[in-house]
Image: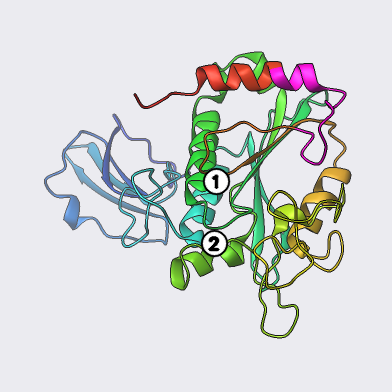
Amino acid sequence: MSVALNRVQPRRVNSTLRRPGMFYIYDDGDESDQSSNKTLTAECANQCTQTKGDIRQRLTIQKCLITPRRKLKRGKLKLMDWKKYHRLSVIYAFIDELERDYPAICTVSVIGKSVEGRDIKMLKISNSNADNSGVWLDACIHPREWISVAVITYIADMLVKNFHSLSSAITSKDWHIIPVLNPDGYEYTHTHERMWRKNRARYGGQCVGVDLNRNFSYGWGQINGEEGSSDEPSHIFYRGPAPFSEPETVAVRDTILGSITPFKVFISFHSYFELIIFPWGNRQDPCPDYLHLLEGGTVMARVTPRNT
């Protein structure tokens, strides 16, 4: 950025950071009488005195040379870390901050609304190469599984902040990350019932909630019981009145089907069994991609740290 200051050229310029968002510039490094400068405009001040034919210029430039992307002091803003579990507002502020700080590779969008009207936000990490394939990562479809949110936000943080040093196997992907797929349920676990599993839809009178993981269309309603789903609204595995009856699962479907990027990977994070599960879940015979999925799952298991 260039600034015109009445055509008076300083002899020498030193810059000193005084406070967030503001830099002061002096011609000879003399900072002792900084307070005597007067602000003549909203952005910059120019006070000149002339002694013995020598022009001494003091310049105070506010918010016009360099404005840091983030302030050093954030007041009461809660920062994201991985030492505790955070509320929805902190998680969303975290991905919004990644978009602000890394606009070349990060985009945040709202892919849908929950039953109670909360945003379902997605962070996309991409170098915008048209040949990229898509990777889908979501967490918290079951809201009581808080650690899934912590894991997926940690992955997002590592991807973004190390993106340009990572291998092409990673940077050649469009990463679609949904940190909280069930925002209503997630907030409910913080404010009312810690072990709540479903969303907050109301069916069957006083019964609340659909198990979103049972609300997708493939194999819907084929298996009942503890290993399948239930048609009873009071059941913890209630699958809903119809496939994609819930706005949260509709958001997933519409985002993937509406994408021009072909998806090659879909991973949903859960807790707490320390398992990597892949199709089929509704029958015993192997799926067509069984060997590839087994190989990928085995590699994931081997590189995942274990507490010993």
Is 139 situated left or right of 135 in this image? left
Q: Is residue 189 visible?
A: yes
Is residue 208 positioned above or below 237 on the image?
below
For the residue pair 149 and 284, the one nearer the viewer reads as 284
Residue 37: image quadrant is bottom left
Residue in view at x 49 percent, y 23 percent: 304
Q: How is the image coloured?
A: rainbow
Is residue 274 positioned above or below 123 on the image?
above
Which residue is under mark 2? 186
Which of the two labelled residues, at mark 2 and mark 1, occupies the earlier sequence position?
A: 1
Magenta stretch holds residue 31? no
Q: Percent x, y for residue 281?
A: 76, 39
Disc 2 to disc 1, C-alpha distance: 25 Å
Which residue is under mark 1? 100
Is 258 situated left or right of 78 in this image? right
Q: Percent x, y for residue 47?
A: 28, 52
Give the extent of the magenta segment.
279-294
Q: Percent x, y for residue 131?
A: 82, 22
